[in-house]
Image: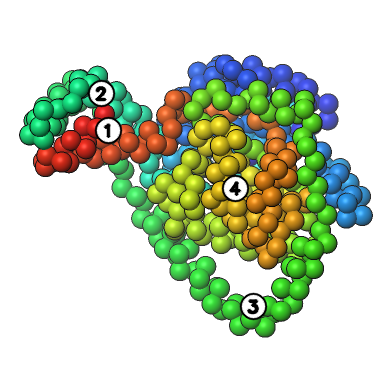
Amino acid sequence: MVIAPLAAGREAGLRALLQTMNLNPGMADPAGALLPFGAFARLHFARMVLLDDALQADLQAYGLPRPQLPTCLAFMGDCDGPARSLLAELAQQAGEGLRRIFAHCEGFRADGDLLAWMLVHDRPLAASYVNWVGRSVQQIRQESALQRALSARVERAPLASGAEAVRMHQALRAFVADETRAGRLSLTPPEPTPLGWQLAKLVHLLLVPLIGLLLLPLLIVLLPLLIYQLRSRESSDPENCPRPQADALQALEELEDYDVSNQYTAQGPVKPGLFRRWLVTVLLVLIDYACRHVFTHGYLARVQTIHFARWAFLDDKTRVIFTSNYDGSHQGYMDDFINKVAWGLNLVFSNGVGWPRTRWLILGGARIEQRFKYYQRRHQLPTQVWYKAYPGLSLADLQRNQRIREGLERAHLDEAQAQAWLGLL
């Protein structure tokens, strides 16, 4: 997540330049001359978005002056493997285009070290979610090609018997073997997980609970004070959930529904005071822990439509930015959260200025449906450029295609298993 403030007077020029990168409003051309996203085989999603300071005015509800913050360019990506190596590839293969883009940023030198500049401006994430840890772009594309090839060879008629389904499974295995030998299909085995990554995950798995246990006695002593601080703020914090302006809402909607997936980018100020800043910091540590060790295979709590999501602090933890890539419509996405994990939204976003009033941190808030929907639209930012490596494929498609491959790679299926597997095609 590379973020840099814009140089004075360069915003209009950058907006015009970013528009040239798109095939449809907000949807990047994967073969674009400026930045050919599709040339980077490990890149799942990417976006470029301008972060303004318009919502800082909401702090006036607390009697605070509005901070004047520069508009920033944010360049974000979700990739396989280390982020640093992808940035190095970008600098090497798309350096000219990136230099043209970052030339609009404060302090950027066209003759400087592009990779070093991006690394300096790369911001750490407070929490991140990956729908299926280990599923690579290569795997997704190969399994999609496999599904199309197999589906084209299967007649759309009921099979006479389970035995016929078993014979069909064997015939399709032979077909794929021939196609693979001819180079028309590829099913590359997954790369082994790096030992360093496994060790880092194990350390994180153990370290966070250990720190929690060490701090538990202090937490018990401070609990009455913390409860008082929370409830006194929940009962007095101002709400600010007006209906979004029609032109702003239209600008957001014009960037949506060109694919089965959509993007979401939102930001807002954290409620003032150390209590809220520390609370949201701790909660994002816990959310990141759950995303790393619990929600790693298809679910974020009960929501199954999110490919990637991230939370990050800006400006010394006075602002939070949230981004996601999700399947379906925006309305369906919001309803998913309201109906399934409203309490999870409240945990983090109730620490944002203007959030619908909560009780005990998890009640109310996002459950107040209309105010919540107004709030999230008002805090959403137009994403100027958005790239998806596998257009037309939803998470349900990815899961189905993975099951097709797994069934194909099994040498023998019984009759019921073969019939179920053919039904996936």
Mark 3: amino acid: Leu
Mark 1: amino acid: Leu
| Mark 3 surroundings within 10 Å by alpha-carbon count, few (fewer than 14), some (14 through 19), many (20 or more) | some
Q: Earlier in the sequence, mark 2 or mark 4?
A: 2
Q: Where does the N terminus fall, quadrant-wise?
A: top right
Q: Earlier in the sequence, mark 3 or mark 1?
A: 3
Q: Give the secondary structure at mark 3.
A: helix
Tell me the number on the disc at residue 151. 2
Q: Residue at x 13, y 32 (%)?
A: 165
Give yes or no for contact between labels 2 and 4 (Cβ–Cβ under 8 Å). Answer: no
103 on left or right of 201: right
Mark-to-mark CA distance, 3 and 1: 51 Å
Tell me the number on the disc at residue 36. none
Mark-to-mark CA distance, 4 and 1: 31 Å
Nearer to us of marks 3 and 4 is 4
Q: Give the secondary structure at mark 2.
A: helix
Residue annotated with mark 1: 424
Give the colouring mode of the picture: rainbow
Tell me the number on the disc at residue 219. 3
Q: Where does the C terminus fall, quadrant-wise?
A: top left
Nearer to us of marks 3 and 2 is 2
Mark-to-mark CA distance, 3 and 4: 30 Å
Mark-to-mark CA distance, 1 and 2: 9 Å
Nearer to us of marks 4 and 1 is 4
Mark-to-mark CA distance, 2 and 4: 37 Å
Q: Position of residue 376 (x, y in %)?
A: 69, 42
Count of marks overlaid on the render: 4
Q: Position of residue 367 (x, y in %)?
A: 65, 51
Residue annotated with mark 4: 338
Q: Residue at x 42, y 46 (%)?
A: 298
Does the image show residue 257?
yes
